[in-house]
Image (tube, helix red, strand yellow):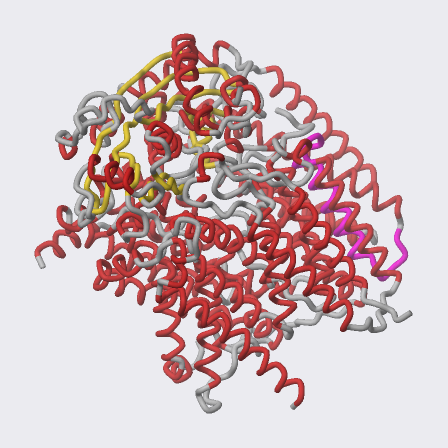
Amino acid sequence: MKKIKLLPAIMTILSVLYLIYVISSESTTLVADTVGGDPGGKVIPIMIALFLVLGFLFITLKERPEESKRNNGTAFLFVTTLILALLYVLLTKSVGFIILTTIVLYSLEYIYTTIDEIRRPVSGIIGGTATVISITAFYTLMRLITKIMLRMGKKGALPAIFGKNSTIAVICLLYIFVIVTILELTVVQTLKKRGLEKEANAGIITFAVVLFLYVVFKQLFLVGLAPGLLNY
Amino acid sequence: MSDFLTGLSLVAHISTILWCAFGSILGIVLGALPGLTATMGIALVIPISYQLDTATGIGLLLSVYCGAVCGASIPAILLGIPGNPNAIATVDDGQKMTKKGLAGQALGSAVIASTIGGLGSEIFLIFFSPLIAQMTLAFGPAEKCTLSLVGIVIIAAVSGKDILKGLLMGAVGFVFAFLGPDPMSGAVRIPFAALLRKTPLSNGLDLTSTLIGLYGVSQVFSELENIRNGQRGEICTNIGKIFPPFRKILSMWKIILSSLGIGTLIGAIPGTGASIAVFLSRNAAETICANSNGKLEKPGTGCLEGVFAPEVANNACTGGALIPALSLGIPGDSATAVLIGALMINGITPGFALFSQNMPLVYSIFITLCIANIFMGLFQLAGVRVYPQILRISQRILMPIVLILSFIGSYAIAGASVSKGIFNLGTALFMGLFGYYMKKNHYPIAPVVLGLILGGMFEEQFRRAVKLGAGTLSRFYTSGICLFFILLAVAIIVSTTIRRRKEKNA
Amino acid sequence: MRKIITCTLVALIAIGMIFAQGLKEEKASFPDPEKTIKIICPQGAGGGTDTQTRQLAEAMKAVSGFDNIIVENITGGSTGIGTNAVIDAEADGYTLLMYGTYVICGTMTGNTDGFEKLDFITGLDLELFLIAVKSDSRFKSLDDVIKHAKKNPGKVTLGNAGATATTGVVAYGLNVALDSIFNVVSFNGGKELIPAVIGGHCDVGIFSQSEVKANIDQLTPIAFLGDDHSIVPEFSNVPTLAEAGYPDLKVPGGCFRGICTTQGTPKEAKAWLADTIEKAFNTESFQGWLRTNGLLSQFTKLDEFDKFNDDLVETMKPILKATGLAKGKYAN
């Protein structure tokens, strides 16, 4: 028995399954469309499915697999990334954008940057927790500023321009810039001196990216990001 | 002439210039971020335009529109992730140029090409609008159906080494499109209908999430190997020249003209879109280069020609899409649709009446479009030295951010619906894995995205054409345009197969 | 050093919790200035429904001073996807639906739970349709078209903007009433129907008045589907179905539109919305827009609108059943 390539074989099977599905599915044509001869919703899908079956079968029979090599380290990275991505998809609604993005982004940054060295899981986890807590705190403060400004803008205590979303978004961007700079110069520098460079870098990058994306997408472009746990 | 002067006086305010500048920058940002679209940007600035003078407001909207089309080339060239479908054809050569260390020149020529495309199509818009509008009327369902066939064949031919694999990937994209509802009756066609019929999946796979998944998420998985080995395939610290040599641009005049024509015409046909135009023009460029006696390089090898052709075409589509919008009141794409809505909110009903009754306003639209195109070029050019800095960041740090950006982009496109957002995230992840395995096995992924766009159009227009022909294929064989397109598709398949054979044997 | 970090963190947590508590307790009255009201338009951008939605959103901003009102087009599934997005949204009054006859069609065709799972805020207006042919068509009147179609059944193509769009229901309704003499062809919205009719690919089309108005040189209206003449000056002479010689043809003449929200929305929010929309509806700009586009006001509020909708549903039932579009309980 000759070896066959896996991918075209799987695609052939999937195409056959799709063909069977299309042929066996109900007609989707309207009763009222019988006048004039609507060809129906199956003709084109069947033609395409037949083409897929034949094409992939041809490739399956023609091509032979080449030696593939993959080292264990990449497999570990692949699985970790996949699991984190899956968690992101599944938990976005319940955990919410801010916290979940922080966790996933920090983990990926930390794991990718420490690939060449022996990891210290404890300091990694502590770093992650600290990042989540500080993002939550500064996010909450930012939201408080937003709320106060909106209210004052509405009451007329501030010029009306401060009651506008886009103005507030710009102010929030400045706020993030200032906080990130301060953190970078104080906490991050101190941590780096103590040999916790990777944790500090992952933390500050996550901090800046998460809050920046939040302001750009939610406050500037009014995209409804999932609030999740931080539902205020 | 007096109409023109009145039109000029409508826009000759400093505020028009400032708002156009603001719109251009906003548009470029929107285009460069995956998941944010020109349509969204226009919708966002409508409230502002409502408060401005009509002409200024329209200028703002047009600036956002042009900027977004142009901005999409930045991530396409630097990261291989197109900001939106308009930039898919730019990815190939753009990425190859970046890897050669020519990122600056790739970005610079993309801007110049976009500006040429935008301004060139405006000339068509101003002088040949009624003529082109009449030409597009010849495109009925049968013609659109065969056009989409040509589109998918060309994409299969230009991407990848094996045209069969390209066609198969296109067919996979078609199948993804067929999971959506029956285009004529709206009946659900998704498998496991009992479970899925009320989910967003019953509407088929979301296009933007698929695009982001196939290009963005799969990129992250593909880069894992490089991350592991610590090698950076592309170290490009030297930005180099930004402007391509002027002589080089001149030598490409045939490519520019053909891309301009293709872009304007395809843009003007409602319901087709820039994604066909960019591949058609890239294919045309390939033919032109093959016949240039070696003066021009072949697209696909990482050359200016391969960036110029699609970038001229996609911005030419902006002017093209405005032709039916202004002369017939029919939007050429979804961004112009919002634009028409905005015009109507501003009290203008687009259509032929606009030309006969309010010529000064039409002129002011032309002038602001011109300003918008120039600003688009200037502002994007201003940043060309800055954008490549992103390549200095280590892949280890950049890739997690790319993954998060891909996710937030596909989530954002769902808008108000959280459940649709979650399904979009799932689509992006699934497509990321699918794209990763396909790329690993040397199957091209661009045809999947185009298949998803064109599959729905192909099936829908086919059904409609047959129905109009009372159950027969008469609409196809009685139309010269259809016959031409069918022959073209066959010719492309045959010539590509022969050429690939020769290359193999040589 | 470690102490400093620990202290900072503890302090941050404490501050954060206090803020969070403070923010949660303060219950804002509707609408919260930080939130965004989204009007979901289940139809594509640029069409009549979309334009009206955007017009209304602008008028609402002007009368309420509340700026965060955005329009979002969620299309597909014969308007079912957009409708479902509103049904599944949180019942807080921040997600509204541009409701219309098309949602009734979507409900009866089984694409959404539609009007059964919505709260009714305000009914707005009725957009009436025109039947039109291209200017140099061989058909000069509705009578021409029908007579020709009777002689050659299935040869005259009658275009509409989509099988479950309101013009689609009108087209099928017309065909059922005339013993299926037409070949009804559904297009993907007006943007494809208009060039198809002007370009001669399709013989006759059913359009909204603004679509014909924008192309008045190339399209000739042959019948108006309202009971009285159109209020648009350009179309005031277009004959109604009865005047064209077909008084017995009973088809829905137009598309009704209104605003709905998620079921279970608090009363306070609904009242605010209904009042704001009423004020917006009565602004000069919105009324002017209605007039230029030939829409008829049919304003109703809350319970009135609910009742109005029940009547509308009853009139639609037999038509959908006859066309074979209806599914489930509406098919029997």
Q: In which quarter of the image is the N terminus of chain A?
A: bottom right
The answer to whether residue A189 is visible is no
Tell me the chief SS of the magenta region: helix
Residue at image coords 39%, 58%: B474
Q: Which of A15 and B412 is in front in this view?
A: A15
Residue B173, relative to residue A175: is it above or below?
below
Q: Viewer-proximal residue, C164 or B107?
A: C164
Residue at x 51%, y 28% (from the top left corner): C109
Which residue is located at x 85 percent, y 62 percent? A116
Instruction: Depth check: give the residue in front, C36 or C161.
Output: C161
Question: At which x and y percent is residue A70?
Answer: 85, 65
Residue sitting farthest toward the left: B2
Q: Does B486 appear in magenta?
A: no
**Span of residues in magenta:** A92-119
Does residue A106 show up magenta in the picture? Answer: yes
Quadrant where the C terminus of chain A is found in the figure: top right
Q: Is residue B56 visible?
A: yes
Q: Residue B148: x and y, percent? A: 47, 60
Name the side, left or right, on which A226 lies relative to B51.
right
Question: What percent of the width, then of the height, locates residue A213?
Answer: 59, 44
Give residue B480's quadrant in the image: bottom left
Please determine whether, in this image, residue C75 is positioned above or below residue B495. above
